[in-house]
Image (tube, rainbow, N blue to C red):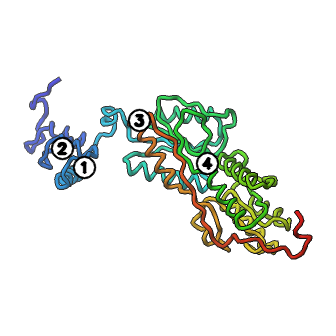
Amino acid sequence: MTLSHSSFPDLGDGTATSHHARTTRGPSMADVAREAGVSSQTVSRVANGLSNVEESTKKRVLDAMAKLGYRPNRAARALKSGRFKSIGVIMFTLSTFGNMRTLDAIATAASRAGYSVTLIPLTDPTTGKVSGAYHQLREQQVDGVVIIFEAHLLDHTDIELPEDLPAVIIDSNTGSGYSVVDTDQQQGARLATQHLLDLGHHQVWHIGGPASSFSALHRAESWKQTLEQAGITPPVVTHGDWSAESGYQIGIQLGKNTQVSAIFAANDQMALGAMRAMHELGRSIPEDVSIVGFDDLEESASFWPPLTTIRQDFNTVGRLSIENLLKQIAGNTSVRDVSVPTELMVRKSTAAPRPPKNAAECKE
């Protein structure tokens, strides 16, 4: 339907209502082009973040957009390109240090790439809940999904997700068919355990994380293998819940055993609790007991004594998960799994074991 100029009443100042209709719906790309003295194609390139525009021209266009109050139509661009510049994140808990740091890194990397993030936290680690969240994000027209698994699925060993939406998995045993980015948990636990053995300790006790946690499982398995490779029979693992309080309670029990001279805790919070237990029991760190943590909290260097620990590079895990996902979104189906190395941070909480005072203390 074509409307002529006479179809609109005059506003009394010589300006027809056709102009009023245009202004009420907001300025158009053509309006911005006229204001900036450029073509509509140039405005489109600036609006879509393309780099083939001179900086002076880009500034002129952006100034015109600001002056007129122009907002690019994101939905229209998405329909045209088939991408909505949005990424979904599914995770089981926001309470752990590692998950929060990883989520922060994901959001930062996504923002730098021009993507928004939609978060769906799940309370129940089941395949049905994950699949439901996955479908919910697909209905919200995200371009891809990052899934952070802190715990085993309760009803299935492997996850099964639809294949029509790119996905990257963090911290999981997903089986084949999914792209995985994670910290090298086994390497970190091996570094921690071997460090204590190299100092001369004949046994290393382990304060494990929750039995449902993938990362806790990987760390415990690597600790066990490292001891066995050294010809040492591993003691029984006692599992905490990642909290300093659980580390303290386990530390009280371990500290009462005078044979315990080296402890590897599965995270820094539990290591902190174990350190408190040793102080209360009158066992000196590291003279009587050496303690190693895992994570490298910002506060770990300020523990007393400063904590020897394994540093996880959460920023790299988050960044690589987004880079991996964006490659899939762009159509790259040969994306490889990524294992991010850890680093041993040696501080004052570990040392060679104190020589036994008498022959009785030499006995196992």
Which residue is under mark 2?
Answer: 42
Do tag 4 and tag 2 residues touch (Cβ < 8 Å)? no
Is 6 placed left or right of 139 in the picture?
A: left
Q: How far apart are marks 3 and 2 (CA)?
A: 29 Å
Q: Distance between the residues labelled 4 and 1?
A: 40 Å
Q: Mark 3 points at which residue?
A: 332
- The three-letter amino acid code for the residue at tag 1 is Gly
Residue 93: mark in rendering: 4
**Mark linked to residue 92:** none
Q: How crowded is mark 3: few (under 14 residues within 10 Å), some or many (20 or more)?
A: few
Outermost residue to the right: 360
Viewer-nearest of discs 1 and 2: 2
Secondary structure beneath dot 3 equals loop
Check disc 4 and give the amino acid type. Answer: Thr
Sort mark 2 into few (<14), some (14-19) or many (20+) by Cα contacts within 10 Å. Answer: many
Q: Earlier in the sequence, mark 3 or mark 4?
A: 4
- Residue 208 appearing in the image: no
| Residue contact at pointers 1 and 2, CB within 8 angstroms | no
Q: 47 above or below 261?
A: above
**Residue 125 makes an appearance in the image:** yes
> Closer to the observer: label 1 or label 3?
3
Q: How far apart are marks 3 and 4 (CA)?
A: 30 Å
Position above or below: 328 against 355: above
Q: Up-down: is 227 above or below 331?
A: below
